[in-house]
Amino acid sequence: MVWRAYQKVKANKGSAGIDQMDWQDLEKDLKGQLYKLWNRLSSGSYFPQPVKEVKISKSSGGIRKLGIPTILDRIAQQVVKTHLEQILEPLFHEHSFGYRPSRSCHQAVEKAKQNIFTNDWAIDLDIKAFFDTIDHDKLMGALGHYCKDKWVLLYVERWLKAGIMQVDGCYIERESGTPQGGVISPLLANLYLHVAFDG
C-alpha cells in the first residue's frame, strides 16, 4: 500500500516540504523511510508536519496560497486517498468531473455541450477561497457518516489541523480549510461539495 502510494506520488513529482527532503534525499534510504512511514501509519503514531506555504500569482490577478506537505506526508495522504476513493467515488454525482479519477475537463465540456440542448439555463459559480474556508467539523461529520474506519478519520483530522509554515518561518495554526497542494485535499473538497449540493 505504501509502496504503491510512493510510486503514484513520485509520478506527480512536486517539491520538498518544510523538511526540505527532496526525491533524491528520500531515495538514499527509500526502504527504510517507507518502512518507518508504514510502521507509524499502522501504529497510530504518525503525525504530519506543517505544510509549507507557497504563494503563486493567479492569471486573473491576486494570489493563490498553496500548502505543500512534505513528500512523506504526501505519500501517507495517498495511502488514505486510495482507500477513501473506493468508498466516496460511487457516491458522487455522475456530472461531477473536478479532481476525479478517469474524468477530465474535456469530458466536462462535452457534457456541458450535451446539456445545452436540453436546458435553457446555466449557473456560473465560483466559491471564493473554497479550499481555505472548509469547516473542519462539518467535513469530519460528513466523512464519519460515509467512512467508519477510525484510522482514516484520525489521519484526516491530523492533516486538517497541521499548521502552516510561512516563508518567513512564522507558524500559523489552521482552524478551517484543507490546503491546496495536499494529495487528499481535492477528494475532501469533493465530499464537502457532495454533501452541500448533491447529498
Image (cartoon, grey):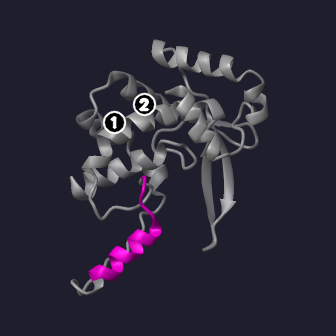
| Residue drawn where x is 54% and y is 33% of the image | 4
For the residue pair 199 and 135, the one nearer the viewer reads as 199
Circle 2 — which element? helix
Is any part of residue 114 visible from this angle?
yes
Q: Is 107 included in the stretch rendered in magenta?
A: yes
- Residue 71 picture quarter: top right
**Direction from residue 146 to residue 192 in the image, left or right:** right
Question: Circle 2 sits on which residue?
Answer: 157
How many numbered marks are there?
Answer: 2
| Residue drawn where x is 54% and y is 14% of the image | 39
- How far from the left and from the top, in percent, is residue 44? 46, 15
Question: Which numbered disc covers residue 187?
Answer: none
**Direction from residue 146 to residue 136 in the image, left or right:** right
Question: Circle 1 sits on which residue?
Answer: 140
Callout 2 crowding tier (Cα within 10 Å): few <14, some 14–19, many ≥20: some
Q: What secondary structure is the magenta-colored segment mainly? A: helix
For the residue pair 89 and 132, the one nearer the viewer reads as 89
Quick one: label 2 or label 1, which is nearer the N terminus? 1
| Residue drawn where x is 33% and y is 49% of the image | 192
Which portion, as a residue range, is magenta?
101-115
Work out whether 73 lies above or below 29: below
Q: Amino acid at mark 1?
A: Met
- How far from the left and from the top, in percent, is residue 153? 37, 28
Residues tagged 2 and 1 counted as in contact (Cβ below 8 A): yes
Is any part of residue 22 visible from this angle?
no
- How far from the left and from the top, in percent, is residue 103? 41, 60
